[in-house]
């Protein structure tokens, strides 16, 4: 629940969750190599291997980031291994992942609501909750925020996982026809929305507003791009992600946030400063980057985790350079292309993949300005969405 490996670090000296990420990923790859032969996935795994040898090993060693590279790269390694799910996971396994994630996410959202109302009514002591997290759940340098002044806020490392439950419930609402069923799902949706409100995190609330709107956009785009192949559509989708990321970099300055009505009282220029510092480091290492585990010498956000930045995707570009970023986009392209098979589906059957396209852009916005992606919760979130996507591809429910 804390999203931390603090307990294992205290007991055995290292974070067990990071080791578990790598072991599970290696196990999936081994099972695939023993049971399946597919040229596209063999090429995918080769690309992943080159990527981690160069940017996860060679460059960190040359730039004296050895040791930190393992902490920075573990979640990214797990993310790039996700396409193995498309090969070895049964339909039942994929749906079980989605169902279990919804249950956990719902419990998490309810807990946020309970804490919010408990703080508001004075029934729960804020200092006790802070002490509990500090002693048992929070890892070194990990942020958790429980406050009553100047406003109530309930936020910790796992908070962003409420987006998973919201997403699943939202799709259930969109495809549901019965009045009472829709009413029940709407009630569940409001629990997730209020949990996001309790966290006082703009990215989470923005995601909840953005996904339904962008879903309409992708329904229109599906008609316009109907004659094109899946490969062309996915290439345009990945290109669009790059464009959205560039727009986000321009939008995080205090002046722009004020115009958009998204600024917070007393908010500084931390994100804008990170963008500038990362840009200077990137310009000095434009093609190859500095490697995973690296940081900008112009600005360090956290002494405990110097490789971590709120502008996490922009920082990733700094670590990979143009060549590494291009290879990572190629890995993303193949991960999206591999599960797609079968005939072009009808309109109704296309709903899920169009919806997941909107989800992908929404989550991109969330992780672009917050260090959520490269964590246990970020890994789990992508795992759920990708499992859902693979299932949709198998059942010919999207193209």
Image (cartoon, grey):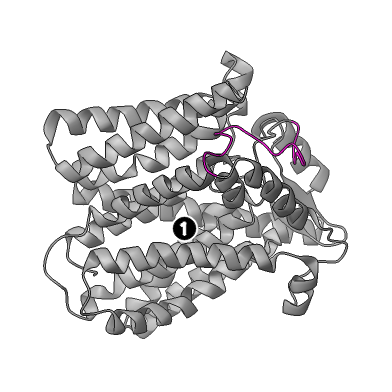
Residue at point 78%, 69% (across, down)? 263
Question: Which x, y percent locates residue 342?
Answer: 12, 64
Residue 214 horizontal side relative to residue 160, left or right = left
Q: Secondary structure at mark 1?
A: helix
Return the residue at label 1.
164
Instruction: Answer above or below: position of 245 versus 216.
Output: above
For the stretch drawn in magenta, what is the main secondary structure?
Answer: loop
Residue at point 27%, 67% (across, down)? 232
Q: Where the N terminus falls, by quadrant?
A: top right
Magenta-tinted stretch: 287-303
Question: Which x, y percent locates residue 47?
Answer: 32, 38
Q: Nearer the viewer, residue 295 or 286?
A: 286
Q: Nearer the viewer, residue 316 or 346?
A: 316
Instruction: Answer above or below: position of 98 versus 157.
Output: below
Residue 110 visible in the displayed image: no
Residue at point 18%, 58% (across, down)? 394
Q: Specify whether residue 250 is painted magenta.
A: no
- Answer few, some or many: residues within 10 Å of disc 1's Cα (few below 14, many 20 plus, some between 14 and 19): many
Question: Which x, y percent locates residue 202?
Answer: 67, 65
Q: How many marks?
A: 1
Instruction: Answer above or below: position of 14 versus 216.
Output: above
Residue 238 horizontal side relative to residue 347, left or right = right
Residue 94 horizontal side relative to residue 385, left or right = left
Residue 24 visible in the displayed image: yes
Question: Which x, y percent locates residue 154?
Answer: 71, 54
Based on the displayed image, in which of its 4 quarters is residue 63 positioned? Answer: top right
Residue 63 horizontal side relative to residue 153, left or right = left
């Amino acid at each position: 629940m804390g999203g931390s490996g603090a307990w294992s670090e205290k007991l055995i000296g290292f974070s067990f969750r990071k080791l578990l990420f790598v072991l599970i990923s290696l196990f999936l790859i081994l099972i695939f190599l023993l049971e399946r032969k597919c040229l596209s996935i063999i090429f995918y795994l080769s690309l992943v291997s080159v990527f981690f040898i160069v940017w996860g090993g060679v460059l960190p060693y040359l730039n004296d980031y050895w040791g930190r590279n393992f902490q920075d790269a573990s979640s990214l390694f797990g993310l790039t291994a996700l396409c193995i799910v498309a090969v070895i996971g049964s339909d039942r396994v994929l749906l079980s992942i989605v169902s279990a994630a919804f249950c956990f996410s719902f419990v998490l959202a309810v807990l946020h609501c309970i804490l919010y109302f408990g703080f508001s009514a004075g029934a729960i002591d804020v200092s006790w909750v802070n002490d509990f997290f500090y002693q048992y759940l929070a890892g070194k340098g990990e942020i958790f925020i429980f406050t009553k002044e100047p406003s109530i806020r309930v936020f910790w490392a796992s908070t962003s996982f409420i987006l998973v439950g919201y997403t699943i419930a939202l799709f259930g609402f969109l495809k549901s026809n019965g009045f009472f069923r829709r009413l029940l799902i709407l009630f569940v949706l409001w629990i997730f929305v209020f949990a996001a409100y309790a966290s006082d995190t703009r990215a989470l609330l923005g995601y909840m507003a953005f996904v339904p709107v962008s879903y309409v956009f992708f329904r229109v785009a599906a008609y316009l791009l109907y004659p094109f192949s899946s490969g062309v559509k996915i290439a345009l989708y990945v290109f669009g992600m790059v464009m959205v990321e560039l727009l986000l970099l321009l939008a995080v300055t205090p002046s722009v946030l004020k115009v958009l009505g998204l600024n917070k009282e007393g908010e500084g220029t931390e994100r804008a400063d990170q963008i500038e510092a990362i840009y200077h480091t990137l310009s000095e290492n434009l093609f190859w980057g500095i490697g995973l585990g690296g940081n900008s010498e112009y600005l360090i956000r956290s002494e405990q985790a110097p490789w971590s930045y709120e502008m996490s995707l922009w920082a990733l570009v700094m670590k990979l350079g143009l060549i590494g970023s291009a290879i990572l986009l190629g890995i993303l392209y193949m991960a999206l292309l591999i599960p797609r098979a079968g005939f072009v589906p009808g309109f109704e059957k296309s709903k899920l993949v169009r919806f997941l396209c909107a989800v992908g852009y929404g989550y991109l916005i969330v992780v672009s300005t917050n260090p959520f992606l490269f964590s246990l919760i970020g890994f789990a979130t992508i795992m759920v969405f990708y499992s859902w996507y693979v299932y949709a591809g198998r059942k010919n429910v999207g193209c």
